[in-house]
Image: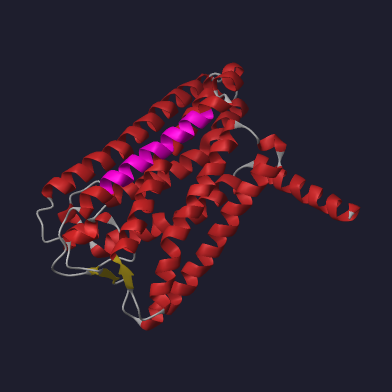
Amino acid sequence: MNYWNNTNVSFFILVGLTDSGDIQVVLSLLFLLIYLITVLGNLGMIVIICLDLQLHTPMYFFLTHLSFLDLCYSNVITPKTLANLLTSSKSISFVGCFTQMFFFVLLVGTECFLLSSMAYDRYIAICNPLQYPVIMSPRLCRALLTGSYMVGLMDSLVNDLCVSRLHFCNSNVIHHFFCDTSPILILSCSDTYGTEMMIMFLAGSTVILSLILICVSYVWILSMILKISSTSGKQKAFSTCASHLLGVTVFYGTILFTYLKPKKSYSLGKDQVASVFYTIVIPMLNPLIYSLRNREVKNAFIRVLQKTGRFRQLK
């Protein structure tokens, strides 16, 4: 992409969240703590699932990759945000900015369809439990995962290609804490209508289609749960998808609030708060949601600790 030929700007300046030095120190400490919890939580989830054979199921196969995506989220956004909060230099190169935006869109698009794949997995587990091992075969799981990454890659390539064709000859100050599409479009001195419509169509299609697949899966799940006569049976069936439903609600709520609206509706304060939530906070929350509410993960953690203890004794 020869986007550097289309602009007089060689770097951007990320304004960040605040100009107050005291608030920057507080935010840097808070974000550092969240970042450490995110890395440890998601790495811990991946390690536990890999080490415990009882968790080698389709559900935890997808959960492993969800933790991997959240880990990547944090490393794409948080380190640069911390550097900007702790130093006076808030610049980012043109190539660096587009690279950050590329991986950010890739991860968002991938997570949308990974969550829909997890919803389909829960639908099969509850509505067709006897055929679950046959339907959710390793081959199908790998196909769903590959499809999720391909959708994210397509979204990312089109997004970067569209934005890179614009001219940036006025300001190079991005009123955001990372290189997101909306605040970059505002800086362009070109006509961005066509670009904006293309990005909105592609991003909207990804979000809406994946959300429809999730909703359809949960409609069938709910109808099956309502047919169960015993209260304990209903609670057991609902508990298998409660964590995923909570994760979906948090993720899509912030995505829909932030992105499915025209560029002119971009609000610096509200959108930055929402962006902090889904780029920094949600990657920390996901391992907590899927572990604290999941007895299988807790038991697997205990088994891994016991195995580690026995291994040390043998040594």
Report the predominant secondary structure element of the magenta stretch: helix
Residue 67 vs residue 240, the one in the foreground: 67
Q: In the drawing, does residue 179 fall left or right of residue 124? A: left
Percent across and percent down for residue 202 are: 26, 40
Q: In the drawing, does residue 150 fall left or right of residue 302? A: left
Is 45 rendered above or below residue 236? below
Residue 226 vs residue 241, the one in the foreground: 241
Q: In the drawing, does residue 39 fall left or right of residue 258? A: right
Is 21 rendered above or below residue 315? below
Point 80% across, 49% down: residue: 306
Magenta segment boundaries in residue numbering: 141-159
Residue 81 vs residue 297, the one in the foreground: 81
Residue 9 vs residue 281, the one in the foreground: 9
Residue 174 lies in the magenta stretch: no
Point 57% across, 43% down: residue: 64
Q: Residue furthest left?
A: 191
Q: How is the image coloured?
A: secondary structure
Residue 150 lies in the magenta stretch: yes
Percent across and percent down for residue 20 are: 34, 81
Percent across and percent down for residue 76 are: 43, 58
Is 121 rendered above or below residue 250? above
Q: Quadrant of the C terminus?
A: bottom right
Percent across and percent down for residue 190 are: 10, 57
Q: In the drawing, does residue 205 fall left or right of residue 315? A: left
Residue 119 visible in rendering: no
Residue 104 visible in rendering: yes
